[in-house]
Image (cartoon, rainbow, N blue to C red):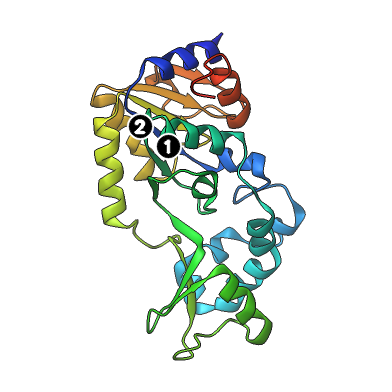
Amino acid sequence: MSTQKLGQMIQAATSIVAFTGAGVSADSGIPTYRGSDGVWNRYDPDKYANVNYFYKDPAYYWSFFKEVRYPVLTSAAPNAAHRLLAHMEATGRLKAVITQNIDGLHQEAGSTNVLELHGNTRSFACVHCQQSYGLADIHDLLQTSFPPACQSCGGLIKPAVVMFGEALPSDVLQEAEAQSSSCDLFLAIGSSLVVQPAASLPVVAKRSGAGLVIVNKDATRLDSMADLVIHGPAAQVLQESLHPHSDLH
């Protein structure tokens, strides 16, 4: 079975990099941008996730955040996929998690070397004076001002997430490329491998000699390049793959 082969590949590897997308957090109850849940569909991702629209109409983003994003963030918990990846790091086999996700669940599960390509929605800063705020701070500010205003200068507060129209943080991307080019096994999990430049990282790893495994519910454009492709939910596939290996589970 393919999950058994994945377990064997993980067991044989000494320097693994995991690249994770929305499919990893789906089992934690976090829908993708275009999820089927009705409350999400009331908001247009081309507006709430677009930096130009954010500055044009910040209240639109903060309405989405207050009604949708905040309740999801505060109720979501790491699932088996997050925990298994954290355990692989603790055993020394997994060197880094490169993620497109912005929910912070990898860190909550115990992963320490997490490269957040698209930032996160648990940290915030004033766009004028750079005063930083945490999730609890924003919750409090939303009770008294809308959109939330900086307590230091009254400026606009923005989440530390990379929106459409913004460049990925160059230092994080460079480290992700370095990790991808030096691993011996690259696991692409729960990503459609469409959004660039992040989706080129599996190619970097493969061309550098690493084994490439793609785990995703649907087919991706890089399936033909991979050494192993498994179509299924991330948590289930990882659990089935690692279950026989007691030192990894």
The quarter of the displayed image where residue 18 is located = top left
Count of numbered tags: 2
Mark 2, Cα crowd under 10 Å, few <14 / some 14-19 / many 20+, is many
Residue at (34%, 56%) from the top-left corner?
A: 168
Point out the image quarter for the N terminus.
Answer: top right
Asked whether the beta carbons under mark 2 and mark 1 sit within 8 Å of each other, the answer is yes
114 on left or right of 182: right
Residue at (32%, 57%) from the top-left corner?
A: 169
Amino acid type for the residue under numbered disc 2: Pro
59 on left or right of 192: right
Residue 81 rendering spot, x and y as whole percentages: 57, 34
* Along the line of sight, the residue nearer the viewer: 6 or 158: 6
113 on left or right of 181: right
Q: Residue furthest bottom?
A: 153
Point out the image quarter for the C terminus.
Answer: top right
Q: Secondary structure at mark 2?
A: helix
Separation of residues labelled 2 and 1 (CA atoms): 8 Å
Amino acid type for the residue under numbered disc 1: Phe
Q: Is residue 204 above or below residue 26?
A: above
Look at discs 2 and 1 and give the one toward the viewer: 1
Q: Is residue 141 above or below residue 27?
A: below
Residue at (63%, 49%) from the top-left corner?
A: 34
Q: Which residue is mark 1?
A: 19
Mark 1, Cα crowd under 10 Å, few <14 / some 14-19 / many 20+, is many
Q: Which residue is mark 2?
A: 202
Q: Earlier in the sequence, mark 2 or mark 1?
A: 1
Residue 115 rendering spot, x and y as whole percentages: 38, 48
Q: Is residue 67 above or below residue 109?
A: below
Residue 103 rendering spot, x and y as whole percentages: 54, 53
